[in-house]
Image: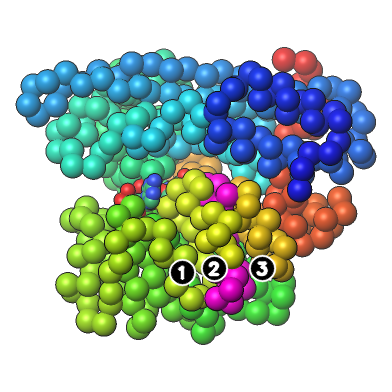
Amino acid sequence: MAIKNAYLADVYAQVEARNAGEKEFLQAVYEVLESFEPVVEKREDIVKAGIIERIVEPERFVQFRVAWVDDAGKVQVNRGFRVQYNSAIGPYKGGIRLHPSVNASVIKFLGFEQCFKNSLTTLPMGGGKGGADFDPKGKSDGEIMRFCQSFMTELSKYIGPDTDVPAGDIGVGAREIGYMFGQYKRLRNEFTGVLTGKGLTYGGSLARKEATGFGLCYFTKEMLAAKGDSFEGKNVVISGSGNVAIYAAQKATEFGAKVVAMSDSNGYIYDPNGVNLDVIKQIKEVERARIKEYVARVEGATYTEGCRGIWSVKCDIALPCATQNELNGDEAKTLIANGVKLVAEGANMPSTPEAVAAFQGAGVLFGPAKAANAGGVATSGLEMSQNSMRYSWSFEEVDAKLQGIMKSIYKAASEAAKEYGCEDNLVAGANIAGFLKIAEAMMAQGVM
Ligand code: NDP
């Protein structure tokens, strides 16, 4: 697919000129704009109000220095970011990523996508994202704490429970959220729900840790059910072995599937008997070690160096849950040749445009990230509600709400696809459904 509509092509050309060289950001904008063709044909009011020109431009983008002292007493400097993309439907909301690959392009792509995802959840949350080019790997606990405190000292100037509520992402889990929350509380002298993904002893929500992975499987279950199918007896390949991957593997297994392969950035494990999640959790969540340790602990499993090889493992369902552009066109063709029936994205933008086109061209069911991985932020939204009420729901209550939200996201995306003439195309459906709500809110609030 390409942008054929002249107006959308003009908007994209302007985005390209303003954000030259920001390839992840441009990729994300292109994918969204190309799915808006049926919208601009039908909705003159949206075009007239300049909504699309406005929605591609973040409301605010801050970049800042994060200086901290390492264990050797040396001063280290990282670059921090926060993009506050769109606040039409609620306070900015989106995670913080700590990874050496973080730059303005990555943060803007994530923030842009977050707007549509948050809108799809049906909860009142605008879109934002943040992070730093800091590598948590190999750092001591003290170094992580000093970095997080320095990062929050600056970030605290821009966020707040009714303004912008960050959460975790790659490299940011409960430990990092704890240090950031503590620093915010110290600086402001207030105990508020300014971050989500908090520990259970200080305002966190039950089921938040599991939410993105569980939500991905709830969404996948809906995709399968629409075709009269289920997880039962399916072989599943899941890339990554972080927060999203681990809980996707747990729920897929509970649904009767067998997860045969998982990875980290060094390589992947193959376990024909189905991965033992207790071992994975021990290695990844407790020891923070490498996935290759798995083969020393589980008989019959093999380890292969190089994470991309995971897509050569034969499976019925593939769930990319590591990072952006981790699955390219050739790897998609290998999956298709090996009989994959469904791909749903746990990570943000893990499939390249060539991979998405290959899956859609081959009739593989494809669940895009904005819809499929929205369970994490949806449950963050539920954490915000609980914080505002100064109350907490049980695991079962939160999980039931999450299931309901994933069902309604599937329904909204598939119905929008149908209404706008691209039935079964959940990429277009999710983009359109997420966009329309934001567009209505922006038109109601005037030009800004
Ligand atoms: P984690 O940091 O917990 O785990 C990330 C996993 O992906 C690790 O196994 C990591 O391996 C691997 N990985 C990271 N970068 C690369 C890379 N460049 N190449 C290969 N593998 C890589 O992060 P999350 O599980 O939280 O996030 C995973 C994805 O899901 C991201 O795209 C994130 O934006 C998305 N997401 C997360 C949500 C959440 O609630 N956490 C919500 C919605 C989306 P290694 O340890 O070797 O680095």
Q: Nearer the viewer, mark 2 or mark 3?
A: 2
The secondary structure making up most of the magenta span is: loop
Residues marked 2 and 3 touching at CB (< 8 Å): no
Mark 3 highlights which residue? 364
- What is the x, y in percent for residue 404? 62, 60
Give residue 323's position: percent from left, percent from top. 45, 48
Q: Nearer the viewer, residue 387 or 294?
A: 294
- Which residue is the site of mark 2? 334
Q: Residues within 10 Å of mark 3 (few under 14, many from 20)?
A: some
The magenta region covers: 334-352
Disc 3: residue Cβ within 8 A of ligand 1's nearest atom: no
Q: Secondary structure at mark 1?
A: helix
Residue 426 lies left or right of residue 279; in this view the side is right
Crowding around mark 2 (Cα neighbors within 10 Å: few <14, some 14 to 19, many 20+) is some
- Distance in Å between CA atoms under marks 1 and 2: 6 Å
Query: Looking at the image, is mark 3 or mark 1 earlier in the sequence?
Result: 1
Q: How many labels sit on residues?
A: 3
Q: Which residue is mark 1?
A: 312
Residue drawn 44% across and 72% down?
A: 313
**Ligand 1 closer than 8 Å to label 2 CB:** no
Which of pointers 2 and 3 lies earlier in the amino acid sequence? 2
Tell us which disc is closer to us: 3 or 1: 1
